Image (cartoon, grey):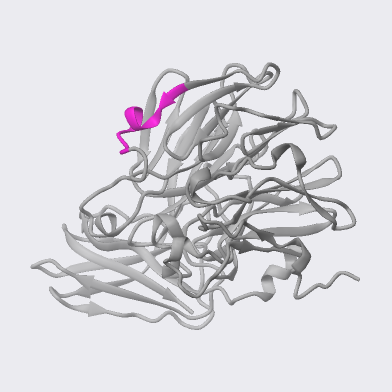
Amino acid sequence: MMQNVSGVFPHLAQIGDFGPPRSELGIGSLMPWNGKLYVQNYNSHKARSGAGVSLRRVDADLSMEIVPETLGVDGTYTNRFVHFPTSKLVLGPHVISADHKIVTIPELQPLRVCGTSRHLTKPDTHVYVLAMEGELFELDITTYECTQLFDLNDELGTDGEMKVHYKDCYTSFGRLVVCSNEYAEPEWAGERSRGRLAEYDGTSWKILRDDPFTAIGGRHEFGGTIFATGWDRASAILEVFTEADQQWTRYRLPKASHCFDHKWQTEWPRIREVEHERLLMDHHGMFYEVSPWAYGGRIWGVRPISTHLWVLGDFCSWRGMLVAGADNASPSHGLNPTTAEPQSGLWFGKTDDLWSFGKPAGWGGPWWETTVSAGVPSDPYLMTGFDGKCLHLENFSDTPLAITVEIDFHGHGRFGAVETLTVEPGQIRSPVFPPGFSAHWVRVVSDADGVASAQFVYT
């Protein structure tokens, strides 16, 4: 009988070679494929950083094998994409056919492959493949010809290996969207902006945001939306593109933990469909349920589920279960002196089990020592799904600011004022909302130009 500890089967642990080198083994992507569950692992930085992260395959009886064709193919791989016109799966540097035959693409094998998506002009035969250092390829799924199209460091002004961290790509509605999540002390201090959210229309590139972003997802034509998750020092961020109005809208969400405030600590949070036509979003230490639909060009019903400390490389539905793949323990070449070997586990449960995890709670807001303009509202900030709520307002200006709190309880972008608070220079005001008070979104507006913070704490 197989041992099961709270949804974890120890015999399915993903364990890297003892080395040297000995760095990390995380589960980068999970994909059910014609009866099997594929588990693609990753090490910290290409093959030289650690061996034994080859592709694994789990059968219906929960037996697991290292896929023989990939033995010794070690590296940093976190992508998954089903190319429906050819019934082939792109997973890491591999292309897997319906009968589980595997072709490894030599041009991709040495790279840190992090994203695969539809091709804008040749979707029946080609896909885009993104690597973490900014290499963007097109791959012919029928011939396996792989051609580099761009170095995104040149296109988007990023800084190359060890100074850039591309994370994901997604194609819909005539645009290829990519993101990177570079973030450290200089970004927090406002001295540098290396993160990117950008899109390509087949002709030219456009930088949408220069904040760190980690995941991009959606359901293609169904719902007419694209979701992208990122953050800055003020809060977590959710950018949403809606097909109906052909524009991006920025929403802000709480941070559930400070442990995700660095590029290396946001390893592969995802936006995935785990129940039919329902999206599960893992963002900055919190799970959310999200609908792919946007009405009136706005989303609503973004609901927090629970908080967690997991580093989750991926999650998926398989045989009626929710399967999550973690990055649990890493010696990090000796930087972690109490961990001996790289290893990670798979968790098996049901989507609704997530509601029994940590209570939704967090902090953040639309302003952090922000230059504000008279009459210009802040970004909308999530207000639903939490118990206790308070707001901290601080005025860094030389004159008083009258700051109005506005709520959108319908969820479609119409806000109404509920309270105005005068904050004197150097003063902090901390109004507490009544128990049970809630709305979909909240925002703040100043009556004068100045510099201010507006941070919510939810418990």
Q: Is residue 49 above or below residue 202?
A: below
Magenta region includes residue 153: yes
Q: Is residue 253 visible?
A: no
Quarter assignment of residue 170 = top right
Question: Which residue sits at x=35%, y=56%?
Answer: 232
**Is residue 102 shown left or right of residue 369?**
right
Q: Is residue 328 above or below residue 296?
A: below
Q: Is residue 212 visible?
A: yes
User: As rendered, which of 35 and 75 lies closer to the eye?
Assistant: 75
Q: Quadrant of the N terminus?
A: bottom right
User: As rendered, which of 239 and 400 lies closer to the eye?
Assistant: 239
Q: Is residue 414 above or below residue 396?
A: above
Magenta region includes residue 188: no
Labels in figure, total? 0
Residue 14 location (% of width, % of height)? 68, 58
**Is residue 76 shown left or right of residue 454?**
right
- Please give the range of residues in magenta: 149-159
**Is residue 425 shown left or right of residue 412?**
left
